[in-house]
Structure formats: structure tokens, C-alpha cells
Image (cartoon, helix red, strand yellow):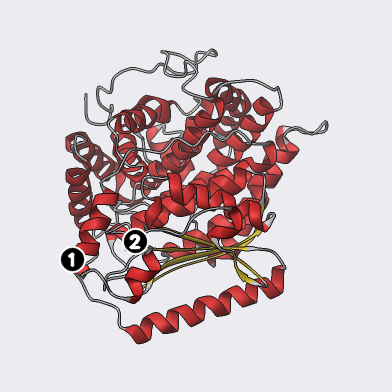
Amino acid sequence: MTGDGVSGVGVQLAELLAARDLRRSRQLDFLERYRLPLLSLTVVSPVPVKRSERVERVFAAAASQASLIAAGANWAVRARSETHARTGPELLMAVDAPPLELKAALVTLEDSHPWGRLFDLDVVTASGPLSRAEVGSSVRSCLVCAQPAAACARGQAHSAGELDSAIAAIMGRTAAVRRKCAGLTVESLGALAAEALRFEVRLAPKPGLVDVWNSGAHSDCELRTFLASADALQPWFCELARTATSADWTPAVAQELGRGAEASMFAATGGVNTHKGAIYVLGWLCVAAAQVLTTGGGTLADVLDQLAGLTSPLLTAWVAELGAVAASTNGERAYRSLGMTGVRGEAASGLATVRQFALPAWRQAAELGWAEDDAGLAALVALMRGCADTTLIARGGSTALQAVQRWAVDCPLSDPAVLRQELSRADSEFSPSRWSPGASADLLAATWFLTQLENHFGGQNGHDMAETSSGTAVIQPWVGHPFWND
């Protein structure tokens, strides 16, 4: 991995031209198949290295923000293609939206986001790409000077060093973005849930976990496996949210949809379990959020109370059933041997671990002006401090859980650059040991989902009080996990 845009192996012109031709071929294929305007995302990187840590961070931020725009406007994304090659990451989406409205929204994103000058967001139709002028916007200026960017690029007016310094300055604008999802609807909840999975897997570095740079402790899957899983799950999340407000809805309906989602996941991944825990927590979050949203009011705390009310009976029934059958899954074995209730217990508590650890860490990072991905890394470490991670138990027993929790407690959360260095170092220890904090990763996706709901509701809404109204869990400073704080 390279941390800047200059070091590393540069890409040759022939590779760039081939990548451009391949991108155009994909666009033509999407236009022919879906007959919809295309959102095409690449990263502005006028330096020799086209794929670096910095480029991937910009791409991830732009991809998530573009998905939020579509969800907020209730524009359906009919197809997606995401690649991460040496020539740079690319995203293509067929969006059921008026082309000029989509272009205007993306131009606004480019012009308003702290890193937006590095976003290259095009809208492509059968007649070709739409220009900024068609939505009343001016051409983009050079990264270094005030001249039009195209003119400076043609004349190679600036050195690679000047361009890299300009990009570094833009990346220094790390204030987190709070996009109020004013148009959030029941129909768009499923899109948010799927994007939460993409946010989690793109985030890097994550010790032992799959991300944009490596497969961590996993030998049976990689980034594209997780992206394929997220794509396959999105329709199921949408259906869970939609049916949650129907007159004939019952918990059994949701459970049946959850089983369908799992089957689609396994079909998309060739039998690999990428998101089984996330299906449970995000699926029930979609149901709970849909039911709260349709009341016309509500808060984030109401969503989590609803989640607890929906899933507590399921936890009780699951525990009772385990008394009559042999344990066959990692979750069942963890409960039998250690009393861990896993993702079922997390949901039934109203996501107490997320509220106690992840959301406070995320909010503190945001208040300090950290970028959203840095806030996500801080939240992940906070989760690893407090989560009774059944994936770690399955892979390394109590020894792995204790070691990871001790590491997380000692991991510094005061500076994002230091945090990233420590996460990279930890990956070199966790991955060879096959330690994968997968449950923490699932809860991180849930955390991102909740931050978007929080933005929709317009703030914390008293959610960081000591209890939810149902009293499901107490929020208090972290004092250690009982596995090793005896």
C-alpha cells in the first residue's frame, strides 16, 4: 500500500488508455442493458500512481456519498459495477433518475464536500456525458492554480510534486460531513443497509478483516466477494423495510425474508458466509426503522427500542430451542460453552455495544474534525474493546478474544494517522493467526447505518442518555470485559 500519490509504481500510458477503453465498454453495456443514465465515479489523480491509500479513501467517500444522494432522492440503483485495479478504483451505477437532476446533485457534491475536488462524478447517457454547463455550473479549476483544469492538464503546467502537494492539502480538509437525509423513506432504507456493508468492507486498514487492500485472516474470500454479497442483499433489505409496514406483517414474514437473504448471499459468494450476522442485525434494523418512520416522527432511540422489542422474543425462543438440539453453528457453540448470545443478543439489547462503544467514539472523532473513514476506524477499535466477538471465539477461542480486546484497549484513539499505523501493524499479527473480529465488523456496518438515521432525525435526539426508554441497556464508560477483567 502507498500512502501518497507519488511513491509506488506508476501506471504507464498504455495501461491508462486500456482502462479508459474498458470503462467505456462497460458504460455502453450498461446503457444497452438498462436504458438508464449512468453514474460513473473515478478519482482525480494526475500523478503517476493511480491507486494508493489516499486514492482509495477519496473513492470510498465519494461512493458512499453518491449512494446517499440516490437513497435520499429515492432513486433506485438498478445495477452496479465496482473495480479496484492498478489504474484506479471505478464505480458504475445505472440509476433510475432524471439525468439532469442526477448531474446537478453530483455537481453539488463535488463542490461542497471537503474532498469533492478529487471526486470525478460523471453522468453518462446514450448521447454521451453531461457537462457541468448543462446544469448551470462552471468548469472545474486546476488543483494548483485558478486556471481551468483542462488547460493546465493539456499543457502539463505543473509538476507531479506540485500536484501531489495540492492533493495533500485537499485531503487535509478532513472535517466529517453530515448530510441530512431529508428525503429518507421506507423504500430507501434497504439501500442504506447495503451501503453500510460497502462502507465497512472498503474501510482500511482493518486487522484480520477483508478490506480494499487484502483479505486479512480469510483465505476463501476477498473484496469483490463482499461487494457481490452486498449487491445481492440490497433487494432483500428493501423488501424487509417495505413489508414491515404492511397490514399482514408478522415476525415470521421477516424471518422468512431473512432466510431468503441468506440463500442469495451464499449464491452470490459461492457458499462463503460474508454477512450472515449482518443480515440479522441490519435486516431487523430495516424493519424497526421502517416502522418508526411511518409514524411520522420518532428518534434514533425509538428505532433501537423497536429493534429490542422485535428481537427479544426471538432471542428467548432461540435459547429455549438450544436446550433440545445439538449445537451446529458458531453462534450456538459460543452460547453453549460461554453463554454468548452473539448478534441475537446485540439486537435484543437495542445494540447496547454500539451505543456504549461505537457511537460515542464516532461522535468524538467527528467533533475533532476527523474524516468519516477515520471516525469509522475509531468506532471499530471501540467495538473491539467491548464486543463479545463470536467470530473471534470460533477462530481462536477465548485466547484470541482476550488478546484482541487487550490490544484494542491499548490502541491510541487520539490521532488518526497514529491510529492507521497501529491498525496496519495489528493486521500483520491478527491475519497470520486467523483472528478475524467479524462480529465487530457487522456492528460497525450497523453503526454507519445508525449515523445516517441520526442525520435524518436531525441529531442525537437524546439517544446518548443512560438508558433507552425501554431500559434495555445502560450506557457507561468502558471498564473492561469480564473475560479478562476479573
- Mark 1 or 2: in front is 2
Task: Determine contact: label 1, label 2, CB under 8 Å.
Answer: no
**Nearest the eye: 273 or 140:** 140
> For mark 1, does the 10 Å Cα neighbourhood hold few (<14), some (14 to 19), or many (20 or more) residues?
few
Residue at the spot 63% in from the left edge and 76% down from the top edge? 29
Q: Percent x, y for residue 368?
A: 27, 31
Between 247 and 169, the residue placed more toward the observer is 169
Q: Is residue 218 above or below residue 170?
A: below
Neighbor class of circle 2 (other Cα within 10 Å; few <14, some 14-19, many 20+) is: few
Q: Position of residue 68 (x, y in %)?
A: 54, 45
- Of 98 and 359, nearer the camera is 98
Quadrant location, the C terminus: top left
52 to 381, vertically: above or below: below
The residue lying furthest to the bottom in this view is: 14
**What label does residue 161 carry, if any?**
1
Question: Which residue is under mark 2?
Answer: 147
Q: Quadrant of residue 479?
A: top left
How far separated are the C-alphas under marks 1 and 2? 18 Å
Choose top left, top right, bottom left or bottom right for residue 211. bottom left
**Is residue 217 shown above or below 419?**
below
Using residue 397 as the reference point, say whether residue 189 is left or right of it.
right
Place of residue 296 in the rendered image (x, y in percent of width and height, measured from the top left): 69, 22
Mark 1 lies on a secondary structure that is helix
